[in-house]
Image: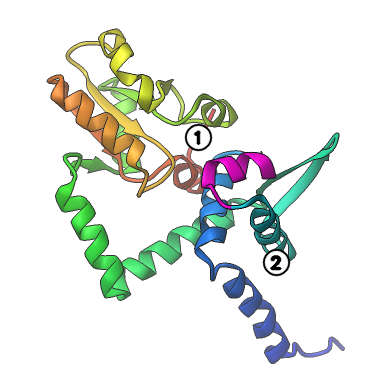
Amino acid sequence: MAEPINQRKLLEQLAGIGKALGHAYRLELLELLAQRERNVDELTRLTGIPLASVSQHLQQLRRTGMISARKEGTRVYYTLADEQVTALLGMLREVAERNIAEVRRMTEQYSHDSEALDAIGSEELLERLRAGMVTLIDVRPPEEFAAGHLPGAINIPAEELEAHLDELPAGREIVAYCRGPYCALSIDAVRQLRTRGRQAYRLARGFPEWKAQGLPVQ
């Protein structure tokens, strides 16, 4: 006969995941790892967090099974354990937006101030892509694009968009996406495109959320 589950001990293990999520630095590291695997030096450069602190936070995330690691030579590369971690981060954002007044105020202000209010969802984007209605651009850095991107997307990093505007087909809608729902890269891209008279929108979510939904990626 199977031994009954010790509910208190089980809840303690679940609480460990909550504790791992309970630091802004660790959430930032998880969002970067959702794009592609990275080593400590790269995460330190991208976040500006001291290297020793990055290492400590990564070890805490690894102990809860939220990230995995592999060694290549003298370097250790980290990545998310699975797509459920991305889904968990998304649920955390949604709960915060619904129930924390300050978060709700910040996100509403973000939307109000943005010229890229017209965000479209995943299903709507799929329909427009099937109909051949849009040009899809990925404004993340090339290394993140190479690790995975939406089918048919063109990689034009945000800082290079101005130089490539004339290469985008005229008379077609343009949809830009980047790292996630709060990523400013797609907002900036849509601003530039609209300033040049192009019909542009942003994807409401980013590449990790698209992938976590089980939608096709390249």
Q: Which mark is residue 64?
A: 2
Q: Position of residue 3 (x, y in %)?
A: 83, 89
Q: Residues within 10 Å of mark 1 (few under 14, many from 20)?
A: few
- Left or right, 213 with respect to 67, comes to left
Pointer 2 local density, CA inside 10 Å: few below 14, some 14–19, many at least 20 = some
Is residue 39 at least partly visible in the picture? no
Which residue is depicted at the point 44% across and 31% down?
140
| Amino acid marked by disc 1 | Pro
Nearest-to-viewer mark from 2 and 1: 2
- Residue 38: image quadrant is top right
Q: Is residue 48 magenta?
A: yes
Q: Is residue 62 above or below residue 156?
A: below
**For numbered disc 1, what is the local secondary structure?**
loop
Residue 110 locus on image (x, y percent): 23, 53
User: Magenta residues?
Assistant: 39-49
Q: Residue at x 31, y 75 (%)?
A: 99
Q: Nearer the viewer, residue 132 or 57?
A: 57
Q: Residue furthest top?
A: 167
Instruction: From this view, report whether residue 95 is shown above or below residue 85.
Output: below
Secondary structure beneath label 2 = loop
Task: Residue at 57%, 52% (x, y): give it.
Answer: 49
Front residue of 176/1: it is 176
Of the image marks 2 and 1, the number of the one nearer the N terminus: 2
Residue sitting nearer the eye, 21 or 81: 21
Residue that appears at 52% across and 32% down: 217
Q: Which residue is mark 1?
A: 216
The three-letter amino acid code for the residue at tag 2 is Thr
User: Per the image, is 214 magenta?
Assistant: no
Instruction: Name which quarter of the figure residue 171 lies in.
Output: top left
- Per the model, the C-alpha gap separating discs 2 and 1 is 28 Å
Q: Which mark is residue 169?
A: none
